[in-house]
Image: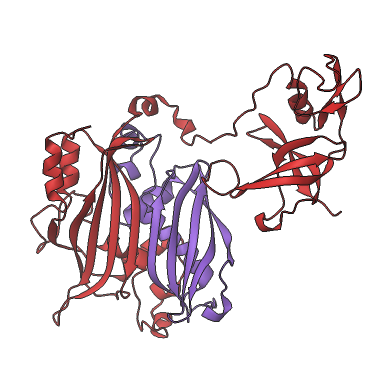
Chain colours: A red, B purple
Amino acid sequence: MAEQDWMSEVRAMVGREYGRVYAWDEVNAPMIRQWCEMMGVDNPLYTDAAYAATTEHGAIVSPPAMLQAWCLEGLHPNNYPPGSTKENPYEVLRLLESHGFKSVVAVNSDLSFERYVKVGERLYYTTRLDAVGEEKTTALGTGYFVTLVMSFFSDKPTGDEKVGELLFRVFKFRPANVQAAAEAPKAEAVQKIKRPKPGVSDDTRFFWEGAAAGKLLIQRCKCCGTLRHPPGPVCTKCHSFDWDTVEATGAGSIHSFVVMHYPEVPPFDHPNPVGLIELDEGVRLVAGLVGVKRNEIMIGQRVQVEFQSFDDGELTLPLFRPVAP
Amino acid sequence: MTSKKTRRFEDVRPGEALPELAIPITVPLIAGGAIATRDYFAGHHDAEAARALGAPHIFMNILTTSGLVQRYAEGWAGPGARFGALKIKLGAPNYPGDTMTFSGEVSACDADKRSVEITLKGKNSMGNHVTGTVALVLP
């Protein structure tokens, strides 16, 4: 799709460098202490001068993850301290906003540190608009990935020193679900992702009802006694439609297996091991493996069924756990 | 002063797993974390503003996530580990009422620099809130 005319204005900004944005406050102990309190960081290097004096730094330093925070403008947008550039390093975001891409989420934050900064240092950063991607549609909505690279310096009379860098990527988008979210009940803020439910038919209902009751049921032909799984309406041996079920002991061995590494799909465990289990009764079924590390799963390993309940009892699944031979 | 020891480079092996760390996600953590990182964007402290942006509730800002990643890496490595890099990618948002559980492992060791790389993730009920790597120089 051809880009809108106004996008050429956006494209022309890529590569642009923006001048200094200073920190409102020099690196200071009270703001460090409050940051540590909120984050639950208990390293005395950031709060205990006596301890810090014994370290390679010699004095209290800023937690490295605080680097960007020192230079944020605070309550009032674009209210930068005296000496800062009059340009707006985020003008590309404002431009995208003016064309309806009002929402923003941070996507990547890649911090690298040349050295730690001490209490008393005054920081500033310069910005380069690194990239604006093609229009993308994600679950959040449609918009653009914007990448900014910020270089952080310590302002020194003897010559400024680079202390770190931040590659910051945001997704600037037009939300897909404003209406839906506004109507969502407030108590349900966290929409827990549930396991997919099996498709239950007249042929398979016995299996899932058995699982819910803690029983591993196998279909049996009433005519010739042959066991079969997965369930079906007809005996593959004698073609009889008559069947009942027997309860398996749940003991078996791993006939084969696969480990799902990618993609990582919630709410499943990661990595996600899945076994093809040969029951001692002679049929095979596919089921999750539990209680085993991915590099310890072996073909022939003895396993025993156990039933686990998911999503507040909505679903009970037979899973298999390795046992001693 | 601290009684906590810093891991020595020689004591760390590639593939070594870090103990998990579960962090309850609360309104005070999200709103307080945003303010402690000087991030006054309304979506991090004002539920109505967050909903107007399409979110069901306030959501954690990336600087708080970075701080929690620092806490997780440093809590394992000890107070004398020096950060060389902290690189994260954001996924599912952290909303109040959820729990984020960090897990990680040592993914690389560089003997010349005495540097180790930790690959980690913080998972909540909707999937991975954060994935990333931390580079630490150990004594």
- In the image, A321: left or right of A4? right
State the image coordinates of residue A300 (x, y, percent, origin top left).
Answer: 80, 50
Locate residue B102 relative to residue A221 in the image: left or right. Answer: left
Q: Where is residue A138 in the image (x, y as percent from the top left)?
A: 36, 37
Q: Is residue A174 above or below residue A67?
A: above
- In the depicted structure, whether residue A136 falls above or below residue A148: above
Residue A213 image position (x, y, % from top left): 79, 29
Question: Could you tell whether B97 is left or right of A260 in the image?
Answer: left
What residue lies at 34% left-to-right and 45% top-to-bottom?
A: B44
In this view of the protein, can residue A87 be seen by the observer? yes
Q: Where is residue A205 in the image (x, y as percent from the top left)?
A: 74, 21
Q: In the figure, B34 relative to A153: above or below?
A: above
Tell me what residue is drawn at x 64 percent, y 23 percent: A199
Q: Which of these two is toward me, A189 or A278?
A: A278
User: How many numbered tags mark residues here?
Assistant: 0
Is residue A192 depicted above or below B75 in this figure?
above
Query: Residue at horizontal 44%, vertical 30%?
Result: A186
Quadrant containing the N terminus of chain A is top left
Foreground: B23 or B45?
Answer: B23
Instruction: Mark yes or no: residue B39 visible.
Output: no
Q: Quadrant of the C terminus of chain A?
A: bottom right
Q: Which residue lies furthest to the top in this view?
A: A241
Give the quadrant of residue A83. bottom left
